[in-house]
Amino acid sequence: MLGGRCFAEGALLLLMVVLTALVTGCVVYEPVSVPSSSYGSSYDRVWDSALGAAGDAGVKITSADRTTGIIRGVTSSSDVTISVISQADGKTRVEFTSKGPKGHDPDLNDRFTSYYNRRMGR
């Protein structure tokens, strides 16, 4: 009789473990999409995109001041300044300038623009 009782307790324990695994193991979360409106403002989105695009383009950021809208950085051959400017019509403009020896890294502006547009979803 003792062997039957141990078997029954073992089976009950196994059943409890299986049921617990079924209950806790079946939670499925749907992916959450983050709409672009989750940004506080278009300025925030433009700022974050410009900052990220600079890094993607190979610019090492040396300073970034969101309140003035100025991002400064360097590449191996150029000093870079990116200005994020709020305009009176509510739009935000980005200006990219680089200074360095002529002919070095001639596609830097194009790379920045491409990465910026990608980050903005264009």
Image (tube, helix red, strand yellow):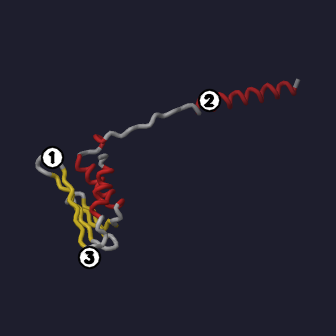
Which is more toward the observer, 44 or 77?
77
For residue 90, which numbered disc appears in the image?
A: 1
Q: Which quadrant, please, contains the N terminus?
A: top right
Circle 3 — which element?
loop
The mark that comes first in sequence, 1 or 2, is 2
User: Which residue corresponds to mark 3?
Assistant: 101
Q: Say left or right for 83 vs 116.
A: left
User: Which residue corresponds to mark 2?
Assistant: 22
Which is more toward the observer, 79 or 30?
79
Amino acid carrying mark 3 in the image: Pro
Q: Say left or right for 31 vs 105.
A: right
Q: Residue at x 87, y 27 (%)?
A: 3
The mark that comes first in sequence, 1 or 3, is 1
Q: Position of residue 80 (x, y in %)?
A: 26, 67
Circle 2 — which element?
helix
Amino acid carrying mark 1 in the image: Gly
> How many neighbours does mark 2 have within 10 angstroms: few (below 14), some (14-19), or many (20 or more)?
few
Q: Residue at x 21, y 56 (%)?
A: 94
